[in-house]
Image (cartoon, rainbow, N blue to C red):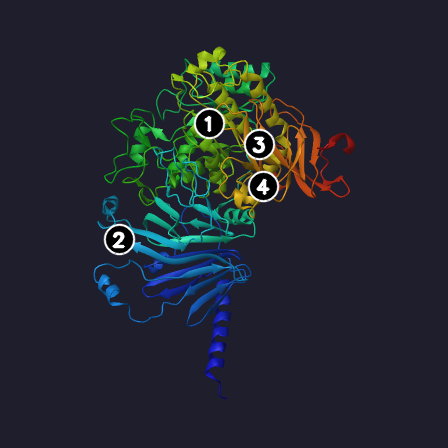
C-alpha cells in the first residue's frame, strides 16, 4: 500500500506522541538537543513545568537543587515534534521549544563581530502559554559562561577546589511586557513593592544598603504565573529593563527554573507548596503577642515582665530570652548568677500562661566546651585548608557550625535539646542564619559556599525542626532571621532583622513584608519599634502626637519615639506574627508613657479579639500555601491602581489595613480597591470602592476597612491562647454572598495533621440576609445571640 509523505509524517508524529506519553508515565522528562546543549522539560502537574538547560547533559538531567521536595508527574502531558518546534502540552500549559534552524547568512558586520565576541550557549527560544493561546512567559536566551576578566568575575574561580565541579556563570533572559509587574524575591528593604525597574540582589546580605536582604528566588507576576529559580548561589535579577527580565547566578552548571501557571495567585502558591512543602500550623501562642527586647539580663527580670502583663490583665503569649544568657558563645549553658534555675522559671511562666522562646546561635568560640570536638569532626564552615572560617579581628564570636552536614545537624539539635529544651523552653530563636560568616570563599560539607551561598537558613532551620518532630511532643516554632526556598516547611517565622527605629525604616517595612510573604513565606514579622539603639536626640518636624516627658528614662531625647512606637504597634497588630523587640531599656507596652499606654493596650486586646479569625487564616495557609498578609494585587488583579501600592494591604479576606507612616499625621489618603464596597471598621460607614478617600487617623486610630461581604468571627477576651476562648460574635458586613471556614484545634500538638480539629463552614446569603453554618458546633448560645450584622 502506498502512503503519502504528509500522511506518513502525521503518522510518525502520532506514534511519537504515543511513545512520549508512555515514556512520561514512567516519570521521564522530555529531553531535547539543541546544537551542543541539552534542554529538559519535566512536568510536576498540569500547571507546573520544570525547564533545565545545560551544555553538560548530565547536569540538564539531574534533579532539582536545595529546597524542592515535589515529585515529577506527567499527568497526561503529551509531546509533539515538528520541523519548527517541539510542543509539550497539558490541559493547563503549552510549552514550545523552537528548533534551531540555520537561517540566511548574517550581515558582514555581525560576522566580523563574531570573530572577537560570541555568546556562551547556543540559542534557545522557549514559550509557555495557556491552551487558549495567552502567553505566560517567553525565554529568549540563556548563558553558561566560564568566569572571565571581561565579565569581571574571574576571581570567583579562586573559590573552587580542584575536586569541585567546574564553575560557570549561568543566566536566562525573558521578555518583559510593559504592563508586567514582579512581586516576591525574598527581602529587600529599599521600599519597592513592584520590582519592575529595580535590580534585586538575591542573597543573604546583612550589610545590604537599606537593610539586611534575604534571597527567596520565587517571583509572582500579574501575568498569571510564578517562576522559581533553582540556583542557590548569589543571583541578580533585573526585572523589566529594556523590555527584558534577566536572571544571572554567580555559579552553576545549568539553568533550571520552574514555572507555575495559576488562574489566581492562590493557585500559584498551591504550586509553590507542592514543590517546596507545606506551611505547618504554628503553636497557637505564636499568633498571639510575642514580647521581646535586647535583652532580659536575669531570671528575675523575665518574671517581673510576665507579672506586669498578668497584673494588668493584658494578653501576651510568648516571652523571649535573647542572647548572652550563656558564659561563652556556643557553651550552651546559663550564667548561674543571672539564671540560677531556668527550669523553675519556665515552670512558673507556664503556670502564668506564657510560653518561652530562647535565642540559639550557630556560633562556637574557641575555648567553649564543644569547639574542639567540632574542629576534630570537621563540622565548621571552613576555608580550603580546613581552618574554620571566623570573623577576626573584629568579630570574635567564633565559627559557624556546618549544618549542611546531616551528622553535624543532628548533633547540633541534640546539644540544644539536652541543654536548652530540657530546661522547659518551648521554642527557639535561630539567630544569624545567613550564616553570620558569609560563605563565599569558604566551604560546606555539600560543597563550595560560593555555589551554595543561600542554603544555610534552609538546612539550619531544618536541623531544629526535624529535631522537634523527633523528640518533642508540642509543635515546633523557630524564629529565623533568613530564609530560602522551602524554609516555610520548617515551622519557621522570619523577621526582617536588625532595622532602625526611624520613620523611614517603619515606612519601608510595609512593602518589604508584602514581598516577603509574596515569596511563599507566610509568617513574616519585624521588630516593632526597630532593633537599633535610639539616637540621643531626635526632634521631629511636627509636634509629637504623644507626650514623651514621662518616658524619658526609656526614650531619652527622641521626642517623637512614643508616637513612632504606637503607630508601628498598630501596624504590628495586623501582621501574621505580632512581635515587639528592640534595644530600649524597657520594651513593654507600659514603657512609652501614660498617653501611649492605653492605645497600645487597645490594639493588644484587639489582636486577641481577632484570634478566631487569625487562627482560621493560618489553617487556610496550611491547606493552600497562600499567605494571609496580602499585597493588593493578589485579590484585585484587575485594578491597575494597586499594582505598586506600597502602604496598604489585605489581612485575610476581610481587612484592608492602611498604616499611618508620617510623623504628626492625623489624616491619610486611603485607596479602596474597585470591585467591592468597604466599611470603615471604626465607624461602620460604607464606602464604594475604586476611589481614594481621606480618612481621619488620630493617634489612637489605625485606618482600617472591612470588605463588604465579609464574615468576621470575634472571640471573648483572654489573657493568653492557653485559655479556652469562646466565640463572642460573628460579625457580618453585608454586600455580597460569602463564606468563611472557622477553624479550631488543640493549638499545641500535631493532632491536626490527623484531622483532629473542629471546622465550621459559615455562609452568608446577602439576598436573604441569613447566616447558615455546617460542621462542628462553634458556639453554645443561639445564632441570634452570636450574629451581628453591621448596618452603615
On screen, residue 628 above or below 79: above
Q: Earlier in the sequence, mark 4 or mark 1?
A: 1
Write down the residue under mark 4: 673
Q: Are marks 2 and 3 in contact (CB under 8 Å)?
A: no
Mark 1 vs mark 2: in front = 1
> Where's residue 44, x and y in %?
50, 55
Write down the residue under mark 2: 146
| Distance Cα–Cα, label 2 vs label 3 | 56 Å
Q: Residues within 10 Å of mark 1 (few under 14, many from 20)?
A: many
Q: Residues within 10 Å of mark 2 (few under 14, many from 20)?
A: some
| Distance Cα–Cα, label 1 vs label 2 | 42 Å
Residue under the image location 52 percent in, 32 percent down: 472
Mark 4 vs mark 2: in front = 4
On screen, residue 757 above or below 153: above
Q: Quadrant of residue 448?
A: top left
Q: Earlier in the sequence, mark 1 or mark 3?
A: 1
Q: Residues within 10 Å of mark 4 (few under 14, many from 20)?
A: many
Mark 1 vs mark 3: in front = 3
Write down the residue under mark 3: 694
Write down the residue under mark 1: 527
> Where's residue 54, x and y in %?
34, 58
Q: Quadrant of the C terminus?
A: top right
Q: Earlier in the sequence, mark 2 or mark 3?
A: 2
Q: In the shown orientation, is residue 653 left or right of residue 84?
A: right
- Local SS, label 3: strand
Q: In the shown orientation, is residue 401 left or right of residue 643?
A: left
Mark 3 vs mark 4: in front = 3
Q: Are marks 4 and 2 in contact (CB under 8 Å)?
A: no
Amino acid at each position: 500500500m502506498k502512503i503519502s509523505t504528509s500522511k506518513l509524517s502525521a503518522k510518525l508524529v502520532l506514534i511519537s506522541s504515543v511513545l512520549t506519553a508512555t515514556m512520561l508515565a514512567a516519570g521521564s522528562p522530555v529531553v531535547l538537543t539543541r546544537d551542543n546543549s541539552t534542554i529538559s522539560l519535566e512536568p510536576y502537574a498540569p500547571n507546573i513545568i520544570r525547564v533545565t538547560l545545560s551544555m553538560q547533559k548530565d547536569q540538564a538531567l539531574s534533579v532539582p537543587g536545595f529546597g524542592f521536595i515535589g515529585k515529577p508527574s506527567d499527568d497526561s502531558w503529551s509531546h509533539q515534534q515538528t520541523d519548527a518546534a517541539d510542543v509539550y502540552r497539558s490541559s493547563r500549559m503549552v510549552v514550545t521549544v523552537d528548533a534551531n534552524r540555520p537561517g540566511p547568512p548574517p550581515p558582514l558586520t555581525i560576522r566580523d563581530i563574531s570573530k572577537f565576541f560570541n555568546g556562551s550557549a547556543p540559542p534557545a527560544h522557549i514559550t509557555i502559554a495557556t491552551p487558549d493561546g495567552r502567553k505566560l512567559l517567553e525565554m529568549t536566551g540563556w548563558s553558561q559562561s566560564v568566569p572571565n576578566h571581561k565579565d569581571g568575575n574571574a576571581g570567583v574561580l579562586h573559590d573552587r577546589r580542584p575536586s569541585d565541579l567546574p564553575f560557570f556563570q549561568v543566566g536566562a533572559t525573558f521578555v518583559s511586557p510593559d504592563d508586567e509587574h514582579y512581586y516576591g524575591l525574598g527581602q529587600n528593604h529599599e521600599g519597592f513593592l513592584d520590582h519592575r525597574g529595580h535590580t534585586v540582589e538575591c542573597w543573604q546580605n546583612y550589610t545590604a544598603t537599606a537593610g539586611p536582604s534575604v534571597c527567596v528566588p520565587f517571583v509572582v507576576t500579574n501575568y498569571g504565573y510564578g517562576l522559581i529559580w533553582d540556583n542557590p548561589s548569589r543571583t541578580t535579577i533585573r526585572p523589566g529593563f529594556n523590555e527584558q527580565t534577566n536572571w544571572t547566578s554567580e555559579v552553576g552548571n545549568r539553568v533550571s527554573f520552574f514555572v507555575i501557571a495559576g488562574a489566581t495567585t492562590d493557585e500559584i502558591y498551591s504550586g509553590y507548596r507542592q514543590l517546596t512543602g507545606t506551611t505547618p500550623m504554628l503553636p497557637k501562642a505564636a499568633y498571639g503577642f510575642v514580647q521581646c527586647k535586647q535583652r532580659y539580663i536575669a531570671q528575675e527580670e523575665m518574671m517581673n515582665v510576665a507579672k506586669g502583663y498578668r497584673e494588668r490583665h493584658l494578653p501576651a503569649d510568648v516571652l523571649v530570652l535573647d542572647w548572652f544568657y550563656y558564659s561563652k558563645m556556643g557553651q550552651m549553658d546559663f550564667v548561674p548568677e543571672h539564671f540560677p534555675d531556668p527550669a523553675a522559671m519556665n515552670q512558673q511562666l507556664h503556670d502564668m500562661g506564657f510560653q518561652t522562646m530562647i535565642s540559639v546561635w550557630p556560633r562556637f568560640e574557641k575555648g567553649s566546651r564543644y569547639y574542639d570536638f567540632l574542629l576534630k569532626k570537621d563540622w565548621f564552615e571552613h576555608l580550603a585548608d580546613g581552618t574554620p572560617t571566623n570573623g577576626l579581628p573584629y568579630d570574635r564570636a567564633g565559627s559557624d557550625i556546618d549544618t549542611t552536614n546531616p551528622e553535624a545537624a543532628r548533633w547540633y539539635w541534640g546539644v540544644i535539646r539536652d541543654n536548652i529544651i530540657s530546661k522547659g523552653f518551648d521554642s527557639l530563636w535561630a539567630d544569624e542564619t545567613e550564616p553570620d560568616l558569609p560563605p563565599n570563599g569558604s566551604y560546606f560539607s555539600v560543597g563550595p559556599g560560593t555555589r551554595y551561598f543561600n542554603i544555610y537558613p534552609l538546612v539550619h532551620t531544618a536541623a531544629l525542626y526535624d529535631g522537634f518532630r523527633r523528640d518533642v511532643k508540642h509543635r515546633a516554632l523557630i524564629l529565623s532571621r533568613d530564609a530560602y526556598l522551602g524554609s516555610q516547611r520548617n515551622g519557621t517565622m522570619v523577621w526582617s532583622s536588625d532595622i532602625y527605629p526611624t520613620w523611614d525604616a517603619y515606612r519601608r517595612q510595609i512593602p518589604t513584608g508584602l514581598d516577603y510573604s509574596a515569596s511563599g513565606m507566610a509568617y513574616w514579622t519585624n521588630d516593632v519599634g526597630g532593633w537599633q539603639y535610639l539616637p540621643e536626640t531626635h526632634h521631629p518636624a511636627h509636634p509629637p502626637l504623644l507626650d514623651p516627658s514621662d518616658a524619658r528614662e526609656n526614650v531619652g531625647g527622641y521626642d517623637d519615639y512614643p508616637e513612632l512606637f504606637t503607630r508601628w504597634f498598630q501596624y504590628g497588630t495586623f501582621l501574621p506574627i505580632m512581635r515587639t523587640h528592640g534595644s530600649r531599656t524597657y520594651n513593654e507596652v507600659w514603657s512609652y508613657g501614660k498617653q501611649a499606654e492605653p492605645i497600645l493596650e487597645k490594639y493588644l486586646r484587639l489582636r486577641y479579639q481577632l484570634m478566631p479569625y487569625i487562627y482560621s487564616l493560618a489553617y487556610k495557609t496550611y491547606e493552600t500555601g497562600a499567605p494571609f498578609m496580602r499585597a493588593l494585587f493578589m485579590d484585585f488583579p484587575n485594578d491597575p491602581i494597586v499594582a505598586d501600592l506600597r502602604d496598604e494591604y489585605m489581612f485575610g479576606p476581610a481587612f484592608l489595613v492602611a498604616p499611618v507612616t508620617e510623623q504628626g499625621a492625623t489624616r491619610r489618603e486611603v485607596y479602596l480597591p474597585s470591585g467591592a464596597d468597604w466599611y470603615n471598621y471604626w465607624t461602620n460607614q460604607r464606602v464604594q470602592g475604586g476611589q481614594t478617600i481621606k480618612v481621619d487617623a488620630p493617634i489612637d486610630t489605625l485606618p482600617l476597612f472591612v470588605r463588604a461581604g465579609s464574615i468576621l468571627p470575634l472571640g471573648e477576651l483572654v489573657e493568653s491562647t492557653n485559655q479556652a476562648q469562646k466565640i463572642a460574635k460573628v460579625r457580618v458586613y453585608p454586600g455580597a454572598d460569602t463564606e468563611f471556614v472557622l477553624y479550631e484545634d488543640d493549638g499545641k500538638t500535631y493532632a491536626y495533621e490527623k484531622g483532629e480539629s473542629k471546622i465550621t463552614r459559615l455562609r452568608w446569603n446577602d439576598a436573604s440576609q441569613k447566616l447558615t453554618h455546617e460542621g462542628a458546633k462553634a458556639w453554645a448560645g443561639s445564632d441570634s445571640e452570636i450574629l451581628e450584622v453591621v448596618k452603615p
